[in-house]
Image (cartoon, rainbow, N blue to C red):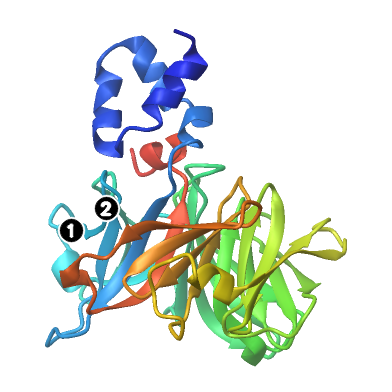
């Protein structure tokens, strides 16, 4: 049997038994650990949420199980989980902060690992975790320590150096125009800004670049990367639009897809008046992921076909989602926080 046929069979298995099969032989371990094979697996889904009925709103973390359901992950392996708060989540990693110890922790509920970061030099106004398992096992934590009219003072922790470094940034737009819609890809933090911009922050060179988007920014707008290109996706409730930037260094935006939301709703078991929340694009294929009440839905933009990816269990329907991420499993994910 050829490796390609064997990979096709393995890719159809649930994740938990699949990774246990790495112990069968060196040949199986080599195939299952290969990044080309890992990119063919279904995207992992992770989310930070609150229980709406709980007396105290404590942030929880959930991830897709081997059967595809979104299930809560226990945090008992992290000894400070009871006196720490989840302040950010990025591609399966959590950024947790303990006020009692004045310390940040980076935690991986998927691999059950965690690390404590050295203390920041200044107090933090806002903290962001940046991790892209498609490109590297390195992660960064950005601590914004002071706001300027069109910029910020900040400290950046890099897992590569193990240290915080101080920087100043100039956005190119008013700080009040910056939104909470941001994504990190391959060392660049993209932030949506009113009225019609994306601010690209190069975390290696600590430089900012302003990218104009093709239409006014809306609360439902999101940033993503697919096929190596930056995408801006938005919806006015009636139509879903997917724009692609041809050249990140100053190219034109191209409208790749414009789909009637009603077309998607007719293919999934939800009521027509219910809203779809845009979540992410597939990093390789022409597929968009959306959240409908009680379920996650994928929609193939080329085949015009919708499919329910996973459903929330009954006990998880009364939850308030704070952040949700879809990302491919990679060797960088398994190696992250390994030391």
Q: Nearer the viewer, residue 91 or 102?
A: 91
Q: Residue furthest front?
A: 266
- Would residue 226 appear left or right of 88 to someone viewing this image? right
> Is disc 2 placed on a helix, strand or loop?
loop
- The residue depicted at 24 percent of the width and 27 percent of the height is 20
List x then y, in percent, for residue 67: 26, 46
- Would residue 274 appear left or right of 62 to someone viewing this image? right
Quadrant assignment for the N terminus? top left
List x then y, in percent, for residue 327: 47, 51
Q: Which mark is residue 209?
A: none
- Would residue 66 appear left or right of 249 to someone viewing this image? left
Earlier residue among tags 2 and 1: 1
List x then y, in percent, for residue 24: 25, 15
Q: Residue furthest top?
A: 1
Query: Can residue 120 be seen?
Result: no
Q: Residue furthest right?
A: 251
Residue at which label 2 appears: 109
**Disc 2 to disc 1, how far (Cα)?**
7 Å
In this picture, is 218 found above or below 230? below
In this picture, is 165 found above or below 21? below
* Image-quadrant location for residue 173: bottom right
List x then y, in percent, for residue 304: 61, 57
* Image-quadrant location for residue 250: bottom right
In this picture, is 65 found above or below 269? above
> Is disc 1 placed on a helix, strand or loop?
loop
Asked if the residue at tag 1 contacts the one at tag 2, i.e. Cβ–Cβ closer than 8 Å, the answer is: yes
Query: Can residue 110 be seen?
Result: yes
User: How many other residues sit within 10 Å of disc 2, few (<14), some (14-19) or many (≥20)?
Assistant: many
Quadrant assignment for the C terminus? top left
Q: Which mark is residue 75?
A: 1
- The residue depicted at 51 percent of the width and 79 percent of the height is 145
């Amino acid at each position: 049997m050829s490796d390609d046929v064997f990979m096709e069979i393995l890719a159809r298995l649930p994740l938990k038994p699949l990774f246990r099969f790495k112990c069968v032989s060196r040949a199986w371990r080599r195939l299952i650990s290969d990044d080309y094979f890992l990119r063919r697996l279904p995207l992992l889904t992770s989310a930070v949420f609150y229980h709406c009925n709980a007396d105290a709103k404590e942030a929880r973390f959930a991830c897709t199980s081997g059967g595809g359901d979104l299930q809560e992950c226990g945090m008992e392996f992290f000894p400070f989980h009871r006196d720490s708060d989840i302040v950010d989540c990025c591609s399966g990693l959590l950024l947790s902060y303990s006020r009692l110890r004045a310390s940040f922790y980076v935690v991986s509920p998927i691999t059950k690992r965690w690390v404590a970061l050295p203390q920041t030099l200044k107090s933090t106004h806002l903290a962001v975790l940046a991790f892209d398992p498609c490109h590297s096992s390195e992660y960064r934590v950005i601590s914004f320590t002071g706001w300027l009219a069109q910029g910020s003072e900040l400290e950046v922790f890099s897992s590569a150096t193990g240290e915080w470094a101080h920087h100043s940034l100039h956005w190119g737009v008013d700080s009040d125009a910056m939104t909470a819609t941001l994504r990190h890809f391959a060392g660049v933090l993209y932030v949506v800004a009113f009225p019609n911009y994306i601010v690209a922050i190069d975390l290696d060179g600590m430089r900012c670049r302003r990218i104009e988007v093709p239409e006014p920014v809306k609360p439902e707008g999101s940033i993503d990367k697919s096929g190596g290109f930056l995408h801006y996706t938005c919806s006015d409730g009636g139509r879903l639009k997917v724009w692609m930037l041809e050249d990140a260094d100053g190219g034109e935006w191209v409208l790749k897809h414009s789909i009637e939301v009603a077309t998607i709703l007719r293919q999934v078991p939800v009521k027509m008046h219910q809203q779809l929340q845009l979540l992410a694009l597939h990093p390789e294929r022409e597929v968009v992921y959306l959240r409908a009440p009680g379920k996650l839905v994928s929609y193939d933009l080329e085949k015009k076909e919708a499919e329910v990816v996973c459903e929330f269990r009954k006990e998880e329907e009364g939850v308030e989602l704070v952040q949700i991420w879809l990302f491919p499993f990679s060797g960088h994910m398994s190696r992250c926080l390994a030391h």
